[in-house]
Image (cartoon, rainbow, N blue to C red):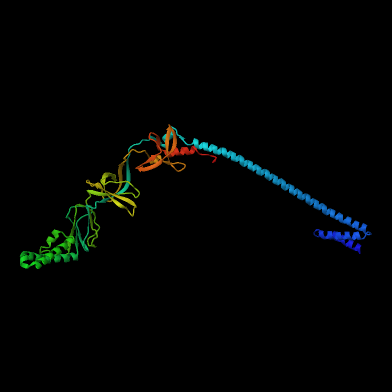
Amino acid sequence: MKKTLISVFALTLLTAPLSFVQAEEDAHQEAGHDHAASGDDHQEVTGEEGEYKEDHGEEGEHEEEGEHEEEGEHEEEGEHEEEGDHEEEGDHEEEGDHEEEGGHGHEDENGGHEEAATASINAKQKELAGIEVATLESKHVDYEIYAPGELLTNGYTSYHVSPRVASVVLRRHVELGEHVTKGQPLVTLFSETVAQAQADYRKAFPEWKRISGLGRSVVGDQRFNTAKANIEAARATLLAYGLNDDDIGALKASGVDSLGEYMLRARVDGAVLTDEFEQGQRVEAGQPLVTLADESELWVEAHLPASSDIVLEKGAEAEVRAAGRVGVATVSQEAHTIDPVTRTRIVRLELDNPEDRFHPGMFADVYFRFKTSEPVLAVPETALMRGADGDWTVYVEEAEGEYEPVEVELGRSIGGLREVSGLAAGQRVVLRGAFFVASEIAKGGFDPHNH
């Protein structure tokens, strides 16, 4: 029976897959125990065991080959890691080289900026660029401030002619642009309200004439006062409707029968600026029909920025230019509020116009003239440039054709000039062409490697 077991065990070894190696080892141990119990079968078992060892020898070779392959893989990975370490060290060395080179580059760059702090410009470049250089002086400065303006009629010498009650236009007596005199008829109107007032006057006048002729002592105080109040009220009503003394005097004549007709007359001397109505048109009370204006003196309304802090005294003069004509106006009024539409500060001036060269509605350029109370250092706005750090800069000529930027602080605006500090009187500064000088300095500091 032991021989049968040994034969089965050997057959199992030949056919079992590698996954059952542990089971084979257990069977081998069991066979060993059987072999120790039976000495007679020792040789047979030994033969079988030799066969088993031969099979395990093949497996050992496979395991040894696997171990060698694994060791080879570990060695290969070690080589890769070593190469990686070498590459990393090379990268660090290369970065160090770059940093060292970069350090040199920055030193060159800093040195370059120092060298590019000035610009050298030859005479030909200076002429082509239109560079203008002048010596800075501390002095009193005459300057002007500009403001847009408009010519208007003088509100104290102009007049809007309009009916006091609803009326119908019957006839017009003047033309647009015509110069009229005070009392001259402008338009004839008809109104039923005026007709009633005229009728009341015509009734009151004869009564008053009779009562006043008899006297207070004859008719009594009450009757006398009533007649007087009636005639005065009728006359006042007609005057309020726009009739004058001549019109009222005509009502006293018994032959007048055209009640309701009345004329509007010129209240001032002047020119007809507007006549926006037609004959037969019904117009309401207060509707302007004719605008009259005395153009011998006009208003000029100048619009200054709301932030402007200039002080304008009454009587201060300003130059007015309109349609190629130049005149002198004086400050008369100034608004204490900001215009809600234009958001500007309004200054009103009076402009003498004896030759009728200026007319209402013209746009004008107004120039207020000033002079500084003490000497100042000032440069034109064209001399100012922004530096690399954003500060205001002026370019000073250190030598012929050599320009150096100098930072300055800005003061008040003086017309087209700007008060500056940071410069000294006697220095030569670039007044025009500063942009070209700034460009030359920028080109001198340009680094093509962008370090």
Q: Which quadrant of the figure contains the N terminus?
A: bottom right
Q: Quadrant of residue 394?
A: top left
Left/right of residue 327 with respect to residue 426 in the rendered view: left
Q: Quadrant of residue 143?
A: top left
Where is residue 391? Give x, y as percent: 44, 42
Where is residue 48? Give x, y as percent: 89, 57
Name the one closer to the observer, 254 or 286.
286
Q: Which quadrant of the figure contains the C terminus?
A: top right
Name the one closer to the observer, 165 or 387.
387
Where is residue 174? Give x, y as percent: 20, 55
Name the one closer to the observer, 65 or 248.
65
Residue at point 30% right, 42% down?
A: 370
Left/right of residue 42 with respect to residue 424 in the rendered view: right
In the rendered image of this protein, does residue 200 appear above or below residue 93? below
Instruction: Tell me if residue 123 can be seen.
Output: no
Left/right of residue 189 with respect to residue 312 in the rendered view: left
Where is residue 24? Give x, y as percent: 84, 59
Residue at point 91% right, 60% down?
A: 37
In the rendered image of this protein, does residue 377 appear above or below residue 226? above
Instruction: Tell me if residue 383 can be seen.
Output: yes
Number of numbered markers: 0
Left/right of residue 48 with respect to residue 108 in the rendered view: right
Name the one closer to the observer, 18 or 267.
18
Q: Looking at the image, which residue sits at the far top?
A: 400
In the rendered image of this protein, does residue 128 appear above or below residue 24? above
